[in-house]
Image (cartoon, coloured by chain):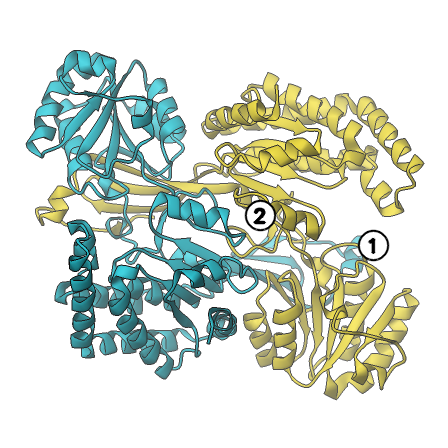
Chain colours: A cyan, B yellow
Amino acid sequence: MNIYEAAKKAREASIILQAVESDAKRKALESIKEALAAHQEAIFKANQVDIEVSEAQNVSMPVLKRLRFDKAKLQDVLDGIESLVHMEEPVGKVQMQTELDEGLILTRVSCPIGVIGVIFESRPDALVQISSLCLKSGNAVLLKGGSEAKETNKVLFEIIKKASEEAGMPEGWITLMETREEVSEILKMNKEIDLLIPRGSNEFVQYIMRNSDIPVMGHADGICHTYVDEHADLDLAVKVVTDSKTQYVSVCNALETLLVHEKVANDFLPRLKESLESKGATIKGCAKTRAIIECEEATEEDWQTEYLDYILSIKIVSSLEEAICHINTYGSGHTDCIVSTDEEAVQKFMMLVDSGNVFCNVSTRFSDGFRYGFGAEVGVSTSKIHARGSVGIEGLLIYKYKLLGHGHIVGDYASGVRKFTHKKLV
Amino acid sequence: MNIYEAAKKAREASIILQAVESDAKRKALESIKEALAAHQEAIFKANQVDIEVSEAQNVSMPVLKRLRFDKAKLQDVLDGIESLVHMEEPVGKVQMQTELDEGLILTRVSCPIGVIGVIFESRPDALVQISSLCLKSGNAVLLKGGSEAKETNKVLFEIIKKASEEAGMPEGWITLMETREEVSEILKMNKEIDLLIPRGSNEFVQYIMRNSDIPVMGHADGICHTYVDEHADLDLAVKVVTDSKTQYVSVCNALETLLVHEKVANDFLPRLKESLESKGATIKGCAKTRAIIECEEATEEDWQTEYLDYILSIKIVSSLEEAICHINTYGSGHTDCIVSTDEEAVQKFMMLVDSGNVFCNVSTRFSDGFRYGFGAEVGVSTSKIHARGSVGIEGLLIYKYKLLGHGHIVGDYASGVRKFTHKKLV
C-alpha cells in the first residue's frame, strides 16, 4: 500500500472512529499498554540497534539521550496511556445548546478533527504518546518519526497497530511513514489530511508551512525572554533566571534573552553573572551591560537567536514599555516572563506581551504540558489560531453543530410567520 | 502610507488594543453608530455612485441587490453594532485555572488574535459588521471589499476610522485596502498578519490558501445534501426539501443534491417534483430517479456541483450507509440533513457525516449565524481547525496562559524537592 492509499484508508477509518464508543477506545488503549509491556524485549532490542547506528555515526549526546528507550521510558509511556484510559471522554461533549424556536434545538458538540499528519523528532516515546492521544480523541493518524529511531519506531508502531486493531479500532487508523518522500507526498493531500503537526527545528516547521496548504499546527521557535523590572526581588530574579537559562538548555522554553531595567542593573548583573558562571553559562551583553560586567558583545543578531546552549544575551532597557516592545519585536511568542513586585507593571506586561505563555516571578521552563497538568502533550504551538502554547488533547478536537427540528423551514421565518426564540439552554 | 507600513501600524495598534478596557470599546462602538447615522446621506450618495457604475456595466440583479446600502441596511448594521455594545466582554475571560503548586497559579484567558486580514464580497454592510466585530474582540483589521462597492466602502471606512480613533481606539487599527495588488502584498506578510478571512467564491478562497502561509479561515463551497430515509415523514420531507432548494438559491447553505432511499422513492419523488416545479426548480436525476420521474440526467459531475440555481440533483440510494458515504465523498463539509423518524438512523447520520452542520428534519437553510443566534457573523468556515460552521466573535479570539508564582523554579521539581499539585480551580 502506497502512502496515498494509506491516507485514503486513514480517511475512511477516521469516519468510523468518530462513532467509536468511549469504552471501546479505553479497551484499545489498555490492549496497547499490555502489548507494549509484553513485547518490551523486542522494543529494547530494536532501540539498541538504533543507538548503535547513531553511536557509530557519532551523533551528539542529547540526541542519543532522546533516542534511548529503556525501562524508565517504557514506564513513562505506559503511565501516559493509563492516564488517557482514565481521562473523561473528550468526544461528544455538549459545548453549547440553544433553542432556536419551539422544537428546534441547536447543539454544538466536540468531535475529532479527522486525519492528522504528525512528523516528529528522534524520541520514540513521542510515537506512543501521539498515537494514544489520537486514538483517545478519535483521530486517524499518519506518523513520521526521526530516522535515527527507525527500528524502534517500527516495532512500536507494529505493536500499537496490531493491539488496537485487534481490540476493534478500524483498520488503517494508524500508519507509519518511513521515508522523506512519503512526507513530501502527504503535504499535497489536502483532501485526505486535515491537520499537520510538525515537531522539530524551526526551519523544518517553516518548510512544512510553505509547502502545504493543509493547516499546520506548528511550533516556530523559542526565543524566550525574562524582564527584570525596576521593582524586583533581585534574589528571586537571580534564582529564576539561572533556572530558566541552565536547568535544561536544549529546549524551546529555555531563556535566551534577559532584559534588565537600568535602575537595578548595577546591583543585579554582577550577582547574576556569578550564579550563571557557577552553572557554566556565559553572557553576551549590550554596551550598557558591558559597562557593568565583563562579557562578550551582543549584536542585533543575538536578539534573534535561539541559542539552545549555555549562552544568555542581556540588554539593559530604560522602561517596562521598552521591554515589552523588544519582546514583541524579537520574541517568538513562546514564553516570556517578568520579575517584579509591582502589581501594575505585572498586569501590563502580561496583557501586552503577545505570547502564548506570559509568566511572573517564575522560571520560563514551566511552560510545558506535563508541568501544566495536561497529561500527554500534542506539541507546543506558537500559532495564534486553533490552539496556542502547550497543546493537550483539546488541540486534536473540533466541533460540529447539530440541529434537530420537526419540519421547520426558513421560509416561515423570512415571511414573519414564525420568530426565533434563541433561548440559551447550555 | 503603503500597505506594508499600514500592516506594521496595525500590528502596533493590535498590541494596544489587547489592553483596551471594555467600556472604551463600548464607547467607540457607540461613536461609530452615531457617526454612521449622522453621515447617512453621504453613505447613500456614495452607494448611488457604485450602483450607477454597476448598472452601466450590466451587473446581475443579485449583485445589485447585495450592493445596495439603503435606510433598511443602515438600520440593520446599527442594530448589529447595538447588540455588540451590549454583548458581554469577550476578552479576558478565564477559561481554565489550575494550581500547579502552592502559590503557583496557571490561568488561561481569552485574548484577541491580533491582526486580521479580511477580504470580502460586494456587500458594503459586511464592512461595518466585520470592523465592529474586530473592534469588540480587540483585533486590528485590514479590509478589502468588492470593487463594485468601492465608493460606499470608502465612505463607511472613513466614518468608522474617524469615529473610533476619536473615541480613543489606537491609530491605524483599521485599514482599507483599495487594490488587488495590496491584497497580493498582504498574503506575504506572515509576520504582520495572524489570520486571513477570505469571503467569496470557492476559487478565490483556494487561491488565497495556496498563495499564503498565513493561516486562512476560509469557506470552501457549499455542496449541501438532504437524505430522505426509508423511515421518513414524506410530507415533512417535501416541505423541508422545497425550502432548502428554493427559499434562496444563490447561497452556500441551499440544497444541491438530494439522496432518497429506494424504498420511499416511488412514493416521494412525484410529490417532490410537483412541489419543486411550483417554485420553478428543475431536477437532474440518476438512472433510478429517471425511471420514476421525468427529468434530465445527472452525471458524476453533478454530484460535485454547487449550482446556486433552481436545479436539484437527485440520487437514489439503497441504504443509510450509502447516503453517508456519498456525502462524505462529494460533500463540502458545510451542511447536510437527514429526514427520518428513525432515532437510530438519525444518530448514526449525525455522528458519521463529517460536516460542520448536521441537521435532522429541517431545512439546510438554517445554517447561518443570524439564525443560530450568534449576532453578527465573521463568516462560515469549512475548515476543520480553529472554528467550524457559522463563526461568531469566538472565531476572532484565542487565549494565552498566564503563570504567576513566587520564585518557583523547575529545578526543584526535577530534583524531587517539590511536587506538582495540579489542583483544578476553574
Q: Residues within 10 Å of mark 2 (few under 14, many from 20)?
A: many
**Could you tell me which secondary element the residue under label 1 belongs to?**
loop
Query: With respect to residue A255, does B383 lie above or below?
Result: below
Where residue A415 sits in the image (x, y, percent)?
83, 54
Residue, x 66% and y 62% (percent of image)?
A: B335
The residue wearing badge 2 is: B217
Determine whether the residue tagged by mark 2 lies in a helix, strand or loop: loop
- The chain carrying label 2 is B
Q: Are the numbered discs 2 and 1 placed on the same chain, yes or no?
A: no
For the point 81% across and 68% down, the residue is: B312
Q: Nearer the viewer, mark 2 or mark 1?
A: 2
Q: Is residue A398 depicted above or below B155 in this figure?
A: below
- Closer to us: A313 or A260: A313
Q: In whole angstroms, how far apart are the C-alphas of marks 2 and 1?
A: 32 Å
Q: Identify the image quadrant of residue B260.
A: bottom right
The three-letter amino acid code for the residue at tag 1 is: Ser
- How many residues crowd mark 1 within 10 Å: few (<14), some (14–19), many (20+)? few
Percent of width and height locating residue A27: 32, 78
Q: Residue at x 64, y 35 (%)?
A: B183
Q: Relative to residue B290, is residue B194 drawn left or right?
A: left
Q: Position of residue A182 (x, y in %)?
A: 44, 63
Q: Note whether residue B267 is visible.
A: yes
| Residue B407 seen | no
**Residue lying farthest to the front in this orientation:** A56
Q: Quadrant of residue A119?
A: bottom left
**Furthest residue to the left?**
A278
- What's the mark number on residue A415? 1
Left or right position of A101 against B209: right
Of all chains, the one bearing label 1 is: A
Observer-nearest of A169 and B128: A169
Do labels 2 and 1 touch, CB within 8 Å? Answer: no
Give the residue type at disc 2: Met
